[in-house]
Image (cartoon, rainbow, N blue to C red):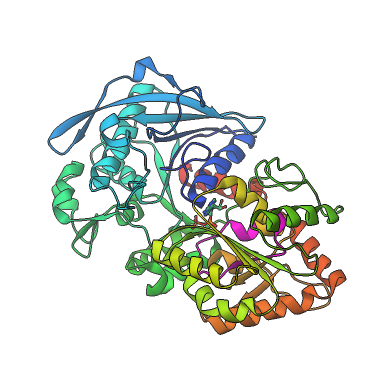
Amino acid sequence: MSKPLNVLFLSSEVDPFAKTGGLADVSSALPQAIKELGHEIRIMMPRYRFISERRYKLHDIIRLKEIPVPVGKITEQGNVKSSFISNLKEKVQVYFLDNANYFGRDGIYQSPVGRKDYKDNDERFIFFCRGVLETLRRLGWQPDIIHCNDWQTGLVPAYLKTVFNQDSFLKPIKTVFTIHNMAYQGAFPADTFQKSGLPKDLFRVDGAEAYGKFNFLKTGLFFADSITTVSRRYAEEIATSEEFGAGLTGLLAKRKKDLHGILNGIDYNVWNPASDDLIYRKYDAKSLDAKLDNKRALVTKFNLAFNETTPVIGAISRLVDQKGFDIVLEALDELLKLNVQFILLGDGDKATEKQFDAMQKKYPQHMGVFFGFDKELAHLIEAGSDMFIMPSKYEPCGLNQMYSMRYGTVPIVRATGGLDDTVEDYVGSGKGTGFKFEKYDPKELLKAVQRALKVFQQPEEWKKIMRNGMSKDFSWEHSAKQYVNLYKELLK
Ligand code: ADP
């Protein structure tokens, strides 16, 4: 093997320490997969207060105490703690950048009560981006690559190319920026720009500004040496259509030769029905009957009657506009008349929760809901459902459809982004892994469900679809290799 690379992976969420969505899963699994390929990769994330020192055996790195980090006119202090992710043979070291003022809180981006973004998110992530580089200089470990993820890390490439471009330690480092979702950009009022300490003239359209605001995502996309996103189709969508590019299509189109679509994988150490401790009964493609025990456990949990031939449709999601639950609500009356049971685990928009709650009260024998974030229940829903719906308006990659296929739970998805790249539409004769629809429309969703229900009534044919999905290789290894190749290209 050629020389192992040193990579620093930056993320604001890493499972199991902090998670609001798929970013956390990726930020945990991808570094492990890259480490398994023989490279030295370490993670750095903020140390939110709720990350338990005892549970994760965090320890101080004395050498990295009281790192001065300028934020506007003040200088904040950072401390670094360390722990490991160790699901695999290889442990991955995680550094936590600590500052009680910015991260000593109960939420990641917003207060858990009231769900309002923290007002100082600009400062919090200016501190993080700048603090990461100040830490590196003192750590004495020089990465070849810094792999940034989403807007919270967007200023790192800009600091490297400007403030630190004469620093002999930091200067050689190349950056990769991965977009997990274009809709979250970290756009702040123009007057916050001065807090970043970036050169004044960078606040321009060819730089850190977008539509009059200081835009962290744009800054990352502008200055990173290479850009990736999490599926091929989404890479195409964001560089060609304003609807997907959320105002930054022009920039992405310009950088198209540096923009790569690399599909996320799934972590089989966490999501595998044959070894999943969070489900009622383990199973694999040869023991599909055991999946039925999970179905029984699931419906019973929601006080629904168990019936082998009544299909259970599951959904697990953040309840936000992107995920398409408005068309689910529009279709729901019709859908629940089809002799199905629908189980939703959702977290997010309160008005949407209320509407689903009302529907559950209207159809108590056909519907179960749980609002909140519940990892264990997420696993049971994957294992116990027959079908899984993801009608997203857009979907950069989407993980739950892949988890579903792994669990023999047939996905019904809208053909967009990673959903389109990972699910093969059923075409008859036992071919396909799920059911897709094109148009964002409740009637189209219903039609796709009806198509699925028809096949569900033919158990042998249905089992073929289940097994097709279960046998797909969504492991991280393949994607990890693509990232490593990209790193190597940059270092040539
Ligand atoms: P996104 O990152 O846009 O939320 P993904 O499908 O990529 O969507 O990843 C979602 C991840 O978050 C999955 O691991 C899923 O199981 C988990 N998840 C989403 N909502 C919930 C919830 N309410 N409770 C538990 N896990 C959830």
Q: Nearer the viewer, residue 422 or 225?
A: 422
Could one spot residue 324 in this view of the protein? no
Marks counted in the figure total 0
Q: Nearer the viewer, residue 308 or 265?
A: 308
Point 48% across, 30% down: residue: 94
Was residue 398 drawn as part of the magenta stretch in this picture? yes
Residue stretch rendered in magenta on the structure? 383-402
Was residue 362 drawn as part of the magenta stretch in this picture? no
Point 65% across, 33% down: residue: 88
Give coordinates of residue 357: x percent, y percent: 50, 65
Whether residue 468 sits left or right of residue 7 in the image: it is: right
Whether residue 181 sits left or right of residue 291 in the image: it is: left
Q: Nearer the viewer, residue 188 or 17?
A: 17
Give coordinates of residue 374: x percent, y percent: 55, 48
Q: Quadrant of residue 310?
A: bottom right
Work out whether 412 lies above or below 55. Answer: below
Work out whether 95 lies above or below 376. Answer: above
Q: Nearer the viewer, residue 449 or 135?
A: 449
